[in-house]
Image (cartoon, rainbow, N blue to C red):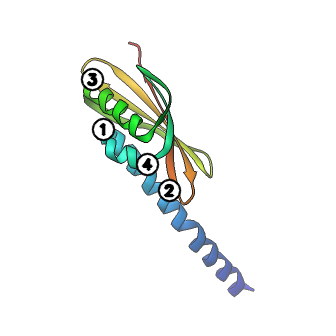
Amino acid sequence: MQTIKSFLLIIILLLVVPGLYSQTSELNAISDAIKTTDTKTIYDYCENSIILNIPGANGKYSKTQSRKILDQFFKDQPAKEIKLVKSQSKNQNEFYSIIEYKSEKQSFNFFVEIKKGGASFLIQKIQIQEIKP
């Protein structure tokens, strides 16, 4: 009986752990891309179209449009300090991160929603809100 329980535990771990590793590495890659203002990597992790709610752009945009809009945001607001505030799961297939982004001029909170799409996690929505002093 103990052997069967051990075998079942090993099978469960073999099925679950690779998914957890993939999820963690993807979420870290997305957070790191925002922290380094790497729009190419952000682009790579975007759904074909995503919702952007940022100063100057609100709506659903293609990956290419989203990258151009984010490039312009990062150009207009060069990063001075960026830190991950929170990263949490809504459920097994949905996660969100909050990243504090400070430029010379202003401070912002990035809210990033990520959902599982097929075998990987993809960005569904990016919202950037100015933090009022």
User: Would you call the spot at circle 1 few (<14 residues within 10 Å), some (14-19), or many (20 or more)?
Assistant: some
Label 1 sits on residue: 37
**Rendered image quadrant of residue 40:** top left
State whether residue 30 is above or below residue 10: above
How far apart marks 3 and 4 lie (CA) works out to 23 Å
State whether residue 109 is above or below residue 125: above
Say which amino acid is labelled 3: Asp
Label 2 sits on residue: 23
Say which amino acid is labelled 4: Tyr
Q: Residue at x 54, y 67 (%)?
A: 17
Label 3 sits on residue: 76
Say which amino acid is labelled 1: Thr
**Residue most extreme to the top:** 133
Number of the front mark, 2 or 4: 4
- Which numbered disc, 2 or 4, marks the residue that appears first in the sequence? 2
Number of the front mark, 4 or 1: 4
Query: Which residue occupies the foreground of this view, 4 or 100?
Result: 100
Number of the front mark, 1 or 2: 1
Tag 3 near tag 1, CB within 8 Å: no
How far apart marks 1 and 2 lie (CA) works out to 21 Å
- Which numbered disc, 2 or 3, marks the residue that appears first in the sequence? 2
User: Would you call the spot at circle 4 few (<14 residues within 10 Å), some (14-19), or many (20 or more)?
Assistant: many
Give me the disc on residue 102. none
Tag 2 near tag 3, CB within 8 Å: no
Report whether 15 appears left or right of 120: right
User: Residue 83: where, in percent of width, then height?
Assistant: 35, 36
Tag 1 near tag 2, CB within 8 Å: no
How far apart marks 4 and 1 lie (CA) works out to 14 Å
How far apart marks 3 and 1 lie (CA) works out to 12 Å
User: Residue 76: where, in percent of width, then height?
Assistant: 27, 23
Query: Which residue occupies the foreground of this view, 80 or 1?
Result: 80
Query: Which residue occupies the foreground of this view, 53 or 35?
Result: 53
